[in-house]
Amino acid sequence: MKHKKYVLLTLLLIASSCGRSSLSQGATDVEALLKIGIIADSYGEMTLGIDPWEVVVCHIPIFTSDEIFEPSLERMSLSSSEIVKRLTPVVSYFKRHSYGRYQPVFSAGQDVTISDTEASDDCVERALDQSGPEVRGVMVIADAEHGADEFGGWGTPGVGCTVSCSARDTRRSVYAGAGDFMDYWNGDSPLDLVEHEIGHALDWPHSTTSASNSGQELYDSALDLMSDSSAPRMVISTKRHGPGTLAINLYAARWFDDEHLQILDRSRRVNIKVQLLATDTDLSIMGTRFIVIADGVNSFLTVELIAARGDNAHLKFDAVAIHRITVAGTSGVDRQQIVIDGDMQDGDKWTRDGLNVDVLSITSVDGDIKAEIEMTVKKTVTG
Ligand SMILES: [Zn+2]
């Protein structure tokens, strides 16, 4: 009898201390998360504060040999300063999603022109070369539309830089065809493509629900600006912005801090409950925005609660989403982000390799959207 009591007491002590220490582990104890921080540091303060962008129109000759362009006589009529005006909601989009930590500021630059034999990339090279030292990013809009089967644009954070990072040196840039700025939009341009490309210039990678054998990704997740950016307007035709982005991107941009994340250590058997606040909750409200479940040197799972409102109003319901994040290469755009389960509701469970993630509840009270998550590690993983 005495012996049994002792055993029981020991188990209780282990259980409670396990639970506590499993979630108090710091971000620096998860190697892959640490790498994300080191990569972010190599880009300095790129994602914080005022970010001066120059907007440049590139004139494409009617007889251009670049096959990316639709063979057409039509050209965009907007000047760079008119495009700057049209980007005003993009400034608000990033202020909103960064909780006021980041603000792109657009100004009109000098137009550039390419010859018949030059390509769209030459537009960007020219615009970067002529940009002033205070400009940290150059956005080039071609005045011709891309062919229907071609990509809409691209964006790059350029090379790492920590002090006086002018775009002329880093080559940080965004490029898009004229499609979203043509007259047929009657002044009501979709903005999700430009927001997506700025996302790349903030060093965010794509996300997808699957990665094929060839490594070709499908940008098919309606949960992320960096995947199916047009998802909101495909569901609600008046929408113009992209969706919000994933918690891991917000963290890499330093729009979430370590205090907004909890880490589940899989090297010990544990059962624990965590309350998540929706990722769009104002940062003045304390609480966990996402959970990181470490399970490899270069990878981890994230668990977050995405509220079906605002830029995510196209989602049917508030949902808990699990992604697998794999850190690769030397910049964030090389990171692999795959949806494991993008729509977990009350009572849904996800189980794999001795790990259970249960959504006990999702509640919405006076605009506060919360989820209660129970996690159980049955089989431990080390290394
Ligand atoms: Zn992209």
Image (spheres, rainbow, N blue to C red):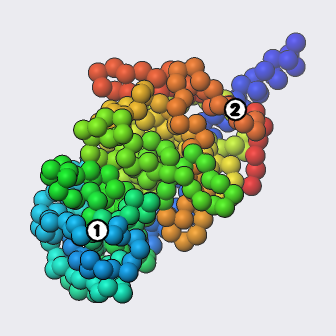
Q: Secondary structure at mark 2?
A: strand
Q: Is residue 311 left or right of residue 22?
A: left
Please report the residue visible at 58 percent of the width from the left and 69 percent of the height from the top: 329
Residue 211, horizontal then vertical, whole percent: 62, 53
Q: Residues within 10 Å of mark 2 (few under 14, many from 20)?
A: few
Residue located at (27% from left, 40% from top): 239
Label located before the other in sequence (2 or 1): 1
Name which residue lies at 34% across and 62% down. Answer: 198
Q: Residue at label 2? A: 351
Instruction: Name the image quarter holding the N terminus.
Output: top right
Residue 95 appears in the rendering: no
Q: CA distance from mark 2 to mark 1?
A: 53 Å
Q: Does 157 sit above or below residue 222?
A: below
Q: Using residue 123 as the reference point, say whether residue 186 is left or right of it.
A: left
Tell whether 120 sits left or right of 248: left
Residue 142 on image: x %, y %? 27, 71
User: Helix, strand or loop at disc 1?
Assistant: loop
Three-letter code, disc 2: Thr
Which residue position holds label 1?
Answer: 72
State the residue at coordinates (66%, 61%).
Answer: 214
